[in-house]
Structures are given as structure tokens and as C-alpha cells.
Image: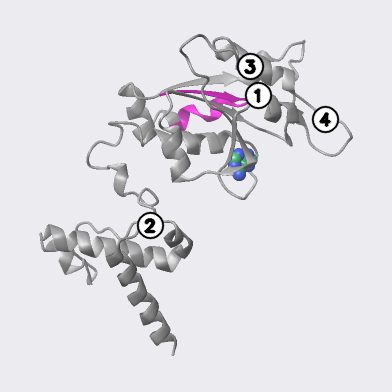
Amino acid sequence: MRIDILTLFPGMFPGYLNESILKKAQELGQLEVYLHNIRDYATGKHRVTDEPPFGGGGGMVLKPDVLFTAVESILPGGISPQPPGSFAPPLILLSPQGRPFTQTIAQELAQHERLVLLCGRYEGVDERVRQHLITDEISIGDYVLTGGELAAMVLVDAVTRLLPGVLGAEGAAETDSHATGLLEGPHYTKPADFRGWQVPDVLRSGHAANIAHWRREQSLRRTWQRRPDLLLTAPLTEEDKWFLAQLAEESVNSDQ
Ligand code: ADE
């Protein structure tokens, strides 16, 4: 996958991109990241990228001409028409007004060969960029960051670990929290006895079916305790539903 990132602060990215899994993904040839400084596409002596909003009010707004020029220079043929046989990649604005980022969206985005990410700053971008340039707008949560750079990095990280071969068999993404629609249950490693706290016997039993069963129940229990909203959409078997009913009954009894 190729990811182009348009930002006023390209220097914020290399540290994170050049370590651990993202570094490995690039070494494997699964990920290519191109950083583009928005200021390089501004004209005039001062290369102005932002101006105060029409109508007054605080803050600065990123200028549409600069952002259109930047996108049209990095996409062959601009935003449209694309060369025959090629598809315009999603052009995603990171902003607190976007749709909330989820594992499902990460999985969708991981199917594309190319993504273009636009990091907002200040009060945001001129509305014509939203209307006529970007194809998607994503938020990483209901809080306001100083810009879209961290959000872009979050998206790159969540998508990259889903690309083929990036995690390898050991860290397979299929059982991650959220990938199954549920939270993951607890994990333990050596030592089996740490300060008198024991690892559950079942995990040391070597009995694969019992371990899988225990893990499923732990995952359901944790989701029920911490994120019951996820249970409304998670794919559940009849056995899962029965287990959840038991949990609900236990909690009613313990309240009495
Ligand atoms: N830019 C500022 N805040 C943001 C958020 N919560 N998500 C994505 N981009 C942002």
C-alpha cells in the first residue's frame, strides 16, 4: 500500500514510521509512505497556507487553492479524471468532525492500494475542500488535537498491521480486540507464579479446546463488563448468548 500524507509538519512522522512494525512493513515492501509539506504548494514570497475566516471569528483556515494544488500535484491526472484503468484513491481529511474511526474502517481502508491523508490544522480547512476535494473525513475520537498528524499516524498504524505478512503468524490480527467484534480476554506469560499470583490452570493444561473455550468466555465477560455496547453488533453463537445470560443472572443475584 502507498500512503501519501499532506501535512504542514512532515517532521512529526519519521520517528514513528521508522520503528517496529511500521518499519518492518516498509522493509517488506508492504507499505510506502510519502510525506508532502503543504507549504511547498503555497505561492508567493511568504508561502501563506492559511488565512483568517471570512466573517470574522478566531483561528486560521487552510486555503483551498494551496490544498487543491498539493493534491493535484501528487495524484496523476489530479483528482479527476484519472488515467484509464486506475482508480482515484480515497482522499481522507483527518478532523474532529469526521466519522469515528473503527477497526471496521481500518479493514476497509486496508483493501486499497493507495490512500491520501490530509492533516487539518488550526480552525480547519476551507469548506470547498470538504465539498469538492476530499472523499472521506475521519476522526479518531471526540476530543480536539492540535492537528490531524497524530490522527493520520493512528490510521496508518491501524491499517498497516492488517496488511498481508506484516504481523506474521504469531501476532495475527484476527483475534485482536475489536477484530472479532469483542474485546480480547486476559493474557499471561512467564513466570506462572508471580508474587503468589497464579496463571489460571487451564492455560497451562495444554488442552487446546478447553483453552479456546475459556478464552471465548473471558472475551465475552470482559466485553460485557467494559463495552456492553459492542455486544449489540458482535457475531454471537447460541452458546455465547447462553453464557452472557448466565453473567447477567449472576450480576442480578449479586446485587440482591
Ligand atoms: N484533528 C484534530 N482533532 C482530531 C481528531 N479528534 N481526529 C482526527 N483529526 C483531528
Residue 2 lies in magenta, yes or no? yes
Which labelled disc corresponds to residue 183?
A: 2
Specify whether tag 2 is near ligand 1 (CB below 8 Å).
no
Q: Which residue is mark 3?
A: 70
- Disc number lying in front (1 or 2): 1
Q: In the displayed structure, would residue 156 be above or below residue 252?
A: above
Whether the residues at callouts 1 and 3 have beta carbons within 8 Å, the answer is no
How far across and how far down the image is residue 141, in percent? 57, 48
Is 170 displayed left or right of 134 in the figure?
Answer: left
Q: Which residue is mark 4?
A: 52
| The quarter of the displayed image where residue 11 is located | top right
Q: Residue furthest bottom?
A: 256
Is 176 displayed left or right of 130 in the figure?
Answer: left
How far across and how far down the image is residue 223, in percent? 40, 63
- Disc number lying in front (1 or 4): 1
Q: Which residue is mark 1?
A: 133
Whether the residues at callouts 1 and 4 have beta carbons within 8 Å, the answer is no
Q: In the displayed structure, would residue 160 be above or below residue 196?
A: above
Q: Which residues are magenta?
A: 1-16
- Judged from the image, the secondary structure of the residue bearing numbered disc 4 is loop
- Disc number lying in front (1 or 3): 1
Specify whether tag 4 is near ligand 1 (CB below 8 Å).
no
Q: Earlier in the sequence, mark 4 or mark 3?
A: 4
